[in-house]
Image (tube, coloured by chain):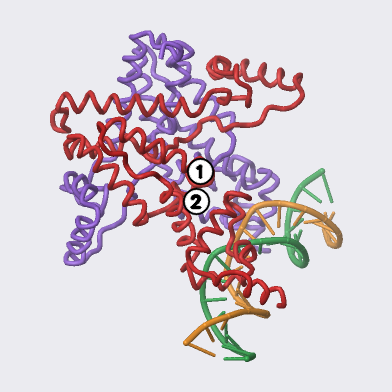
Chain colours: A red, B purple, C green, D orange
Amino acid sequence: MAQQQMNGARRAPLNRDRVLRAAVELADHTGVDSVSMRNLAQELGVVPMALYKHVANKEELFDGMVDIVVGEIDPPVGGTEWKPAIRQRILSARRALLRHPWASRVIESRPRPTLVVLDYLNSVVGMFRAGGFSVDLTHHVMHALGSRVWGFTQDLFPASPLPADPQLQAAMFRELAGRYPHIAEITMSAAHDEGSVVGQGCDDQSEFEFALDLLLDGFDTLHRQGWTSRSN
Amino acid sequence: MAQQQMNGARRAPLNRDRVLRAAVELADHTGVDSVSMRNLAQELGVVPMALYKHVANKEELFDGMVDIVVGEIDPPVGGTEWKPAIRQRILSARRALLRHPWASRVIESRPRPTLVVLDYLNSVVGMFRAGGFSVDLTHHVMHALGSRVWGFTQDLFPASPLPADPQLQAAMFRELAGRYPHIAEITMSAAHDEGSVVGQGCDDQSEFEFALDLLLDGFDTLHRQGWTSRSN
DNA sequence: ACCTGAACACCGTTCAAGT
DNA sequence: ACCTGAACACCGTTCAAGT
């Protein structure tokens, strides 16, 4: 009670923005699973119910957290072709997402896009249109990008840390190679870097850019060919 | 207590498979969020703690549910080129996922792949290798496919049902067009089908195949060119 | 050896009582 | 009018007591 008043006097009064920023910070530091209304309230030195003044419920809290991350994506660069412009924008989105490792999962979990999310998507669509893409092709191309517009893709092999014991490590590799020879093979090919058992040891950033450029080049070809969904 | 015994007499004794199938069925019917250990136990006519005999915890329950869905994916078709073979396999995975709408979200949420998941991925990798792809290119190509190997992609505009009132509907379209002209444009182009405000009205299946074929064609081109990660 | 009720430590959110 | 503690209806999981 005495502490409550001290905090009340020291801190700025609660508002929606402070609530959302505290939630982002909490998720950054301790993981999104520990973002509960109760934990967040404690972090802010208030009673849980005080949060409901500023966000209607937990869903709205998550929406607000997404908006903060999406707000960190750089605006489009001007004076260049559609391809490098879109490439840079998506890589900027990727940097924002990488600063907040929980964000991709939360973005995927939202049942409806927020206004801020729609703003970003609208602007990416506009970049294709400005590059001369037809409405038809732009529509398909946005679907093909999927979550890659956010700069992330689902890791098929999440990074799992290698066991410290090198003998145990070797045993794991042997078991993997025995059961899953094809996975072992592509894993080994990239495993000069250290990192983890599977799928790490490769550079996530360059894998992302490989796939992004493959898609953008494909879009380019279709665009130049005057592709339409009816002609297909 | 009397009912408990009746159930015990009537039903087959609980085992891991029955637990997992009941969980899948419950998720299919009432949504994955309603799959709690308590609800599932009630569905099976047992006390919650009885489940812990057959699954270590809820994480293992989810893993088992994923395994059931992945088990529904058809085996590879033989006697054909890598491209149609992989295409058919992925479209079979898509059909399995569409039968269980919760499955894509659960697959994405798993921190580690199960043995069944590794079996499927290993076999897809093997199909590229059998098609003559280098280890290097196969590795990159699997990253580029990402969650598309499962036959799904993140919907950027989740389907939201249109309001019944046509006047309200028109108002929503007008607001969308005013704020997000580019999104409105690509939405309208596909909105001859009815369905929802944004992004629906287009055929998800053909959008999926568009993106899949774009990627497979891109892979094909790189393969024929003898692409390597060093030559890039 | 197996089963299970009670309990623990959490949730998000409602609601009524207090100021 | 505003604030907030208690309460409600849930969780997953532990544990000890019962058979």
Q: Residue furthest front?
A: A79
Q: Secondary structure at mark 2?
A: helix
From the image, which quarter does the C terminus of chain B lie in? top left
Residue A86 lies left or right of residue A203; in this view the side is left
Q: What amino acid type should be assigned to the residue bearing mark 2?
A: Val
Residue B121 lies left or right of residue A165; in this view the side is left
Q: Foreground: A123 or A188?
A: A123
Chain letter for mark 2, please. Answer: B
Quadrant of the image occupied by residue A46 = bottom right
Q: CA distance from mark 1 to mark 2?
A: 9 Å
Chain letter for mark 1, please. Answer: B
Rendered location of residue B173, percent (x, y): 20, 58
Q: Which residue is mark 1?
A: B106
Q: What amino acid type should be assigned to the residue bearing mark 1?
A: Val
Q: Residue at x 31, y 55 (%)?
A: B160
Rendered location of residue A114, percent (x, y): 37, 56
Q: Residue at x 14, y 27 (%)?
A: A226
Residue B151 lies left or right of residue A10; in this view the side is left
Position of B152 relative to A163 (above/below): below
Please tell me whether mark 1 or mark 2 is closer to you in this view: 1
Mark 1: few, some, or many residues within 10 Å (few <14, many ≥20)? some
Tell me the number on the disc at residue B32. Answer: 2
Position of A200 relative to C12 (above/below): above
From the image, which quarter does the N terminus of chain B lie in? bottom right
Quick check: marks 1 and 2 in contact, CB under 8 Å? yes
Q: Residue at x 44, y 37 (%)?
A: A152
Rendered location of residue A22, percent (x, y): 56, 59
Q: Foreground: A123 or A214?
A: A123
